[in-house]
Structures are given as C-alpha cells and as structure tokens.
Image (cartoon, rainbow, N blue to C red):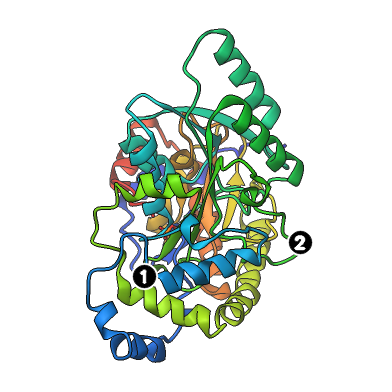
Amino acid sequence: MSTLPKPDASLDAADLLRRPLHNDIIELSGGYAFPQFLPDVTREAGIAATVYRHETMQYAEVLGLDDLRDLIVSFVKADGVSCDRDNVMIVNGAKHGLDLICRAFLQPGDRVIVTAPSYMTALSILRTHQVEFLSVRQDDDGIVTGDLENQLLNDQAEGRPLPKLLFDVPEFHNPTGITTSLARRRQLVELANRFGFLIIEDDPYRRIRFEGDPVPPIKSLDDRGVVIALGTASKIVAPGLRIGWVIAEPDIIERMAGFKADGGTNPFSQRIFAELLRTNQIDELVAKLVAELRLHRDAMISSLAKALPEAEVRTPPGGYFLWVTFPAGTDADLLAGLAPTYGVRIYPGRLSYAGQPVLPAIRLCYSYEDPERIAEGISRLGRAYKAMHSQGLDDATKASLLARLGKVPIH
Ligand SMILES: Cc1ncc(COP(=O)(O)O)c(C=O)c1O
C-alpha cells in the first residue's frame, strides 16, 4: 500500500490559485469515440437518403425499423443471446433504454441495486427517478453476490421492500474495467428469480476486448425473462448515431414502448446503422478499433507507472476506462479540479458512487486521445498531483480551487 507524499517546500499553494486555465486540454474524462476512427458513412447515408427516403424522412415505428430489429437479432446471436424481433426495441442509445426502463418500472422511493462504484450517467438517470440505492461492492469477479444475497435476506427479515431493479455493466465495467465471472452471472440470475427483481445488463464494451475470451452475456443465462439487455452502436461505431437497443420479453418491450414518446428513433440513423450491419462492416471496424485502443490503454498504463507511482491501477483486458485509486487521504476531487489548469481533464471517482466514495479514485478514459497525447496527459496529471502537495495548501485554498472546477459535465 503506497503512502501520501510529504508537502513539497519547493511548491507554493498560492501559485496554484494564480494559474490560468491551460489552453490545450487533453481529454481523459468522457467516453468519446476516437475521432480518427469515426467511420465515413457517406455511402450508407446516400442509400438512406435515396433508396429509403420515404422511410428515413418520416416518423419511425416506435419499436424501430423491422430490418434493424432483425439485424440486431443476428448481431446478439453471435454473443449467445437468442431472441426474436418481438424481443427487440431500438432506442436513442443505451442511456435512453435505461431511462425507459425506469419510467416503466419505477416509482419514487423504489430501490435499485448498483455496484460501488458504478456507471456515473446511469446513477444520474436513476436519480432523476428518485430511487434509493442499494450499493454492493465488487471484487475481481464482479459484483459480490454473497453480499447482495445477505442484504436481500436482511431486508426480507426486516420487512423492507425489496429492490425492483439491478443495474450492472458486467463486461469491462465502467469505471473499474472488471468483468463479472460466469459463476457470478449465474448467481445474479438466481437471485433475481428468488427475490423478484429485474437485471439491467448494460453491455456496450463486450466487443472492445484486447485479450482473453468473452464471458457469456447474463441475458444468455436467463430462461425466465428477468434480464433486460441494453446494447449500443456508440462504442463500436459512433455515439453521434444515437442508436441503441433493448432486448427483453415482449411484454416488457411493450410496457417500455408505452413510454417512448419520441416519434420513433431517428430512422435516418437507424438505416445507416442497418446498412453497416447488413454489409458486415462492423467486425472490421471493431477489429481496427480494438487494435488501436489497446495501444491507448498500454500507453496510459505505462505512463501512470512513471508519472504517478503512488497510484494503483488494474489492467483491464478491454473497454474504455482505467480506475485509478490513491493512498487514503488523497483528495481526488481536488486532483480533478486542478487537472485542467495543468492541461488535462479527468473525472473524480466520487461521480461513480451512489453513496460515499469508498476509496480516493479517479476515472481515466483512453478512447479519445492518441497514445502520444495520453502519455502527455498523464505526465500533466502527475504534475497536478505533485502540486497538490504544495506547502501551505489549506482548506480555504482547496475550496477556491474546487470552485474553479465548477460543475462537471458527464457523459
Ligand atoms: C456503461 C455504459 N453504458 C452505456 C454507454 C453508452 O450510452 P449510449 O448508447 O446512450 O451512448 C456508455 C458510454 O459511456 C457506458 O459507459
């Protein structure tokens, strides 16, 4: 376990307040696509605008284009999920799917199980539905199902209402990068059946695998319809398409569709994505992206070892993020606040917790910047970390620095 560095007499806290904002900020916070790999969809857009004009310039069916729903059935089949068109609804991204699930199944005050830490935007969405969180820790095998079971048994014994939903990202979890083991996935399905909650399996990173073998989706282990799976085009093609999908029992899909008051998901985008799937381009796009992001991840890990030796980080075999923890007593909010003045943006780990952070941590994303800028960004972060140990950094100075951070926009 590493310890906190001592205050550095060569650095003066007053200088921190005088530092201007950097004019070139390296973006290591949000899960943006790698700009150089955004696909050129001129051909697909042309087809959408001509051959399919009467479809793409109209309102769309609430459940999505039949062609795309069928293509999604085949796409998820490759991962072991068997379903029909009736099980699929196209939505405006996975986040939209989550919001619709909340609308269809939750009342204010209902309880939702989340991991600690969890995907920050899912927490924001869940908060807008005024839920109460039941946070369960993770270990290297994912959500600790034994802890969850004990909690649920306690709740039952004490007559507390049981949670209605569980939200998890079992493959390359955001933010920790942990992949839930097969045994834990089976236990989750068993607990959902026993205690009567639905599992939301949010799985945007499954195909962004750098090494090792995939674990079957929870949805593929579900024979009683307790899992609602969310998928998205955002992490494999382009987030700007705003195309995602929900896979669930037809009665669940129907119930959610009742809350989808958007005139249908943009049919132009749906058709572009359908064309990419129909012409089998996704595998190639993903293979190229995986090879690139692997270099990004490796650059970030090796730069962290040099610039922030106090930090602890596990190497995720896929996904977009690193979860970096610091010695107890480190102020991760302050580090995130200071970082932009050193020219790098990161998220404080606090945003990923439904309750109090368990450890000082930050979330780093390696998808957007290239390896060279990632290395430079981490070295800037190292400088910000060092500056946090300036002589005379008192609470008032910290408060002023944090005020400069303002509200952090999250994705
Ligand atoms: C866990 C998780 N789910 C979903 C998404 C993508 O959501 P959407 O499909 O709405 O772009 C992200 C992107 O950051 C994510 O990390």
Residue 243 position in % (x across, y down)? 40, 66
Residue 213's disc is 2
**Side (left or right) of 261 relative to 335:** left
What residue is at 63 percent from the left and 26 percent from the top?
194
**Nearer to me, 275 or 324:** 275
Residue 1 can be seen, yes or no: yes
Q: Quadrant of the N terminus?
A: top right
**Side (left or right) of 356 relative to 395:** right
Asked which quadrant contains residue 47, the reply is bottom left
**Is residue 279 shown above or below 103?**
below
What residue is at 62 percent from the left and 61 percent from the top?
206
Mark 2, other Cα within 10 Å: few <14 / some 14–19 / many ≥20: few
**Is residue 137 shown above or below 387?**
above
Residue 68 position in % (x across, y down)? 44, 71
What residue is at 60 percent from the left and 32 percent from the top?
192
N-term mark: 1 or 2: 2
Q: Amino acid at mark 2?
A: Asp
**Nearer to me, 291 or 342:** 291
**Which residue is tagged 1?**
240
Q: Quadrant of the C terminus?
A: bottom left
**Ligand 1 under 8 Å from disc 1 Cβ:** no
Residue 186 position in % (x across, y down)? 71, 40
Residue 357 position in % (x across, y down)? 51, 32
**Side (left or right) of 11 relative to 58:** right
- Which element type, helix, strand or loop, lies under badge 2? loop
Q: Amino acid at mark 1?
A: Gly
